[in-house]
Image: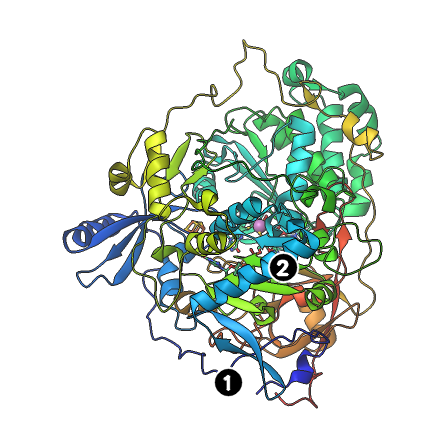
Amino acid sequence: MLSIILYSNMNTTRRKFIKISALGLGGVATTTSVINMFGSNSVIEGLAINNIEKKYKRTATYCEICFWKCAAWAYTDEEGKLTKIIGNKDDPHCNGRLCPRGTGGVGMYADEDRLKTPLIRTVVNGEQTYREASWDEALDLIATKFKAIKKEHGAEALGLLKHGCPGAHFEHLFRAFGSDTMAEPAYAQCRGPRETGFALTFGSWVGSPEPTDIRDTKCLVLIGSHIGENMHNTQIQEMSEAIDRKATIITVDPRLSTAASKSNYWLPIKPATDIALLLAWMNVLIEEGIYDKKYVEKYATGFDELKEHVRQFTPEWAYGITTIKPEVIRKTARAMGAASPSVIIHPGRHVVWYGDDTQRERAIAILNALLGSWGRRGGFYFKEKINVPSFPHPPYPKPKWNWEELGEKYPLAQMGITTELIRASIPHKDNKYPVKAWMIGGTNITKSIPDKKLITKAIDALDFLVVIDTMPMDVTGYADVVLPECTYLERCDILRSATNREPNIAIRLPVVKPKYNSKPGYWIAKEIGMRLGLDDYFDYKDMKEVVEWQLKELGTSLEEMKKIGVKKYPRKSGPLYLVESEEHEFPTASGRIELYSHDLKDLGFDPMPLYTKHPEPPQGYYRLNYGRAPMHTFSRTVNNPNLSALKDENKLWVNPKVARIIGLKNDQKVWLKNQDDIISTFAIKVRITERIRWDSVYMVHGFGHRDKRLTRAFGKGINDTELISRIFVDPIMGGTGMRGNFVAILTENPHKNIEV
Ligand SMILES: Nc1nc2c(c(=O)[nH]1)N[C@H]1C(S)=C(S)[C@@H](COP(=O)(O)OP(=O)(O)OC[C@H]3O[C@@H](n4cnc5c(=O)[nH]c(N)nc54)[C@H](O)[C@@H]3O)O[C@H]1N2
Ligand SMILES: Nc1nc2c(c(=O)[nH]1)N[C@H]1C(S)=C(S)[C@@H](COP(=O)(O)OP(=O)(O)OC[C@H]3O[C@@H](n4cnc5c(=O)[nH]c(N)nc54)[C@H](O)[C@@H]3O)O[C@H]1N2
Ligand code: SF4
Ligand SMILES: [Mo]
C-alpha cells in the first residue's frame, strides 16, 4: 500500500485524491499478446488483408490514440470480436499505414482496467472514497449541480477542460447552457505560440496536420521537432521518403534524437538558445544574398528593418551563445538557400519551451519567408478543409464573459488558456470571472498542465468537478463524479474534417458494443442537456442521425461512407501553391508577409525577434528535457496492454560525464529533486548515453502513474510534469514554457521512511 504521506504535497486538499483499491475495481492484467505493431502496406500484409476480408467484417473508424486522427478499418470476426485495426489506404493522414499506437488501439478497448460504471464521491467511516452509481443518478446529480451553479453565479462559472473528440460534444453542451468558459492543453501547453507566431507573419495558423510539403522538399530543418519519436504519421512517411530522395535534413536538438541520427547535419545546440541560431541564419541569408529576393520583394513587407535588425547577429555572435560553430551555421544556411524555395523550417508542434516561444516561432516563420517557402512546392502548401454543417439548433445564448476575458492579460491568445481558467477557479477578491465548477473530458490535466500547486489549489476550491474518461487516470481521482466513456471503437462520433492537400472527411462508426457500463460522449452530453432543459439543442435520437444528416448535406451518404471510410473532395480555394504570374493577398493587416510586425509593436512587444538569455541550471542540477516515445501517447497509452508490452517505463538519459561524476550505472534506480525541492514520487532507471548533452537529462513524458487502478502503469518511471513547477509564461499568448526546470539526481531513496 502506498502511504498517503507520499502524496502529501499534492493532497493538502479538501477534495482528496482517491486511490481506489477498496472497491475492488482494479482489474487483472490481461494476457492480450502484442499483435502486429507496425502499419500495413507490404505485400505480405496485403495478402493478410485479403484473407481478413474473406472471413472478417470491417468497420470504418478513425484513430483517437493521438490527434493525427488516421482513418482506419477495424476488423471483427464472426463472433463480433475485435481483432485488428488497419490504416485506410485512401486516407491522406495515413496512406494505409498506422503507427504502433494506432495498431495498438485494440488494447485500449481490451484494457481490463477501464472505467466501468459511473462513480460518485462519498465518505465511508470518515474516509473519502467512490461508490458505484447508476447513469441516472450520476447524470441527475450533475444536472442539479449545474443548475444550482448557473442560478447562483451564472452559467459562465462552469468551466470545460477538454481534448480530442469528446470535447466537441461537451463544448456544444456548454455553449447551449450559456458557457464559453473553456480551454485545452493542446493550446497553451502545445501549439499556441506557433499559431500566433505564424499568424502574425503569414496571416494563417499552421494547423493540424501541418501543411509541410515534406513529400517534395529538398531541405527539411527540424528545430526540436523529433519526428520519428513524435509519430505523427504522414510526416514520418514523407520524411523517410525525403531521406531516400537525398533531401538535406538538418536537425537542431540538444539530444541525438531519432531524426538527428538520420540527418546530414545535427546541431547539438545549447538548450534555450535557438533564437540566436535563427537570427544568425537570417544574417547569413541576407548578407550573402542567398534569400529568395523575388518572393520577398513581391510578397513581404519590413525587409529593410529586418536586414538592419539582423546585421549584428553574426554566426560568430551566435557561436558564443549556442555553441554551434560559425562555419556550421554558414554551411547549413547555404544548404537552405540552395534548396529554396523547396525548403521547410519546421514550425514544430509542442513549442511551449522558454516563454519567448511566440518570438521563436516568429523567427522560424520569418526564416521561411526569406527562403520563399510559404505557398511553394516542397515548402508549405495552401491547405483546405471541408466545413461540416452543424446539425440545426437554436443560436447559443451569449455569455457575459468567456475564455477571451479569462485570457485578457495575453493580447494575442486565440483560444482558452488552461492555466488562466484554473487560476480563475481560485477565490480571490479581485477575481472578476469566478469559475466554480469544472467538467473535464478527454484530458488528464494533472499530468498535462504544469504547476501542480496551482491545480491543487483550484480543485480544492471548486464546488463541483465531473470527469469523463475511459480510464481511471490520475485526474479522475479528484472528481466528485466520474463518468466512463466508451472507447472510440465503441461509438459513432463527429465526422473528421481536417486541413490537407485535398479536403476530405472521415467517418467513425461503432465497431463493437460498449463494454461494461460505458457510454459514448455524445450520449452523455445529450442526457445532461435534456436534464438541463436544452432539448432543442439535442433534437436527434443519436449521433448516427446527426452524421447521416451531415453526410447528406455534403453530397454523400452513410451507405457510401460505410464502404469508403474517407471521402475526398476537389479543392475550391485555388491551387496548392502560389502562381507566379498572379498577385496574392496574405490574410495579414497589410496583405503581405510581415517580417516586421506592427501588431506586436503596437502592443508593446518586439516587432522582430530578439534573443534573450534564460536561466541556466545551478551547480549539481541538470535541465529537465522531455519528449515522446514512438509507442506511447502522453499518459494515455501507458496502461494499454499492447503498448505497455513494448515499453512499460521511462528511463533517465544521462551523459556519461555526468554518470561518472555521480557514480551512476545503467539501470540503477534514481529519484529526482527539482529547483523547488519537489521530489519525484517514484524512481526511474538510468540510461547512460552520449546522445544527451552533459547539461541536461531526458525522459519520455507520460509515465509515473500513481493510481493503483492502472495495474500496468502504476509506479513505473517518473512523471515529468510533477517536476515542472516553474513556468515561463509567454506574455504574447499565455503559453506555459516548461523547459526551464532543473533537477538533481538522488541515488538514495528520499522516501525511505515512508511505507511503500
Ligand atoms: N510535462 C509535460 N506536459 C505536457 C506535455 C509534455 O510533453 N510534457 N505535452 C503537452 C502536449 S503537446 C499536449 S497536446 C498535452 C496533451 O494533454 P492531454 O490531452 O491531457 O493528454 P493525455 O495525457 O493523453 O490525456 C488524455 C486523457 O483522455 C483520456 N481519453 C482517451 N480517449 C478518450 C475518449 O475517447 N474519451 C474520453 N472521455 N477520454 C479519453 C485518457 O485516458 C487521458 O486521461 O499535454 C501537454 N503537457
Ligand atoms: N509517439 C508520439 N508522437 C506524438 C505524440 C505522442 O504523445 N506520442 N504527441 C503529439 C503531439 S500533441 C505533439 S505536440 C508532438 C510534440 O512533438 P514535437 O513538437 O516534435 O517536439 P517537442 O516535444 O517540442 O520537442 C522534443 C524535442 O525537443 C528537443 N529539445 C529540448 N530542448 C530543446 C531546445 O532548447 N532546443 C531545441 N532545438 N530542441 C530542444 C528534445 O531533445 C526533443 O528531441 O508530438 C506528437 N506526436
Ligand atoms: S499517428 Fe498513430 S496514434 Fe496518431 S492517429 Fe495515426 S495511427 Fe493513431
Ligand atoms: Mo501537443
Tell me the number on the disc at residue 148: 2
Tell me which image quadrant ligand 1 sits in. Answer: bottom right
Residue 709 lies, in percent from the top left, at 49, 76
Q: Is residue 724 left or right of residue 214?
A: right
Of residues 149 and 373, the one drawn nearer to the viewer in this rendering:
149
Residue 502 lies, in percent from the top left, at 41, 29
The quarter of the rendered structure image containing the C terminus is bottom right
Ranked by sequence position, the earlier of labels 1 and 2 is 1
SS state under label 1: loop
Tell me the number on the disc at residue 22: 1
Residue 500 in sight in this render: yes
Q: Is residue 465 left or right of residue 574?
A: right
SS state under label 2: helix
x 73%, y 76%: residue: 12
- 480 to 225, vertically: above or below: below
Among the 4 quarters of the image, the one containing residue 278:
top right
Of residues 693 and 481, the one drawn nearer to the viewer in this rendering:
481
- 402 to 128, vertically: above or below: above
Tell me the number on the disc at residue 235: none
Q: CA distance from mark 1 to mark 2?
A: 32 Å
Assess disc 1: are there few (<14), some (14-19) or many (≥20) residues with their C-alpha within 10 Å of its C-alpha.
Answer: few
**Residue lying furthest left in this view?**
54
Of residues 267 and 670, the one drawn nearer to the viewer in this rendering:
670
Indicate if the residue with disc 1 has its beta carbon within 8 Å of ligand 1: no
Of residues 504 and 127, the one drawn nearer to the viewer in this rendering:
127
Among the 4 quarters of the image, the one containing residue 362:
top right
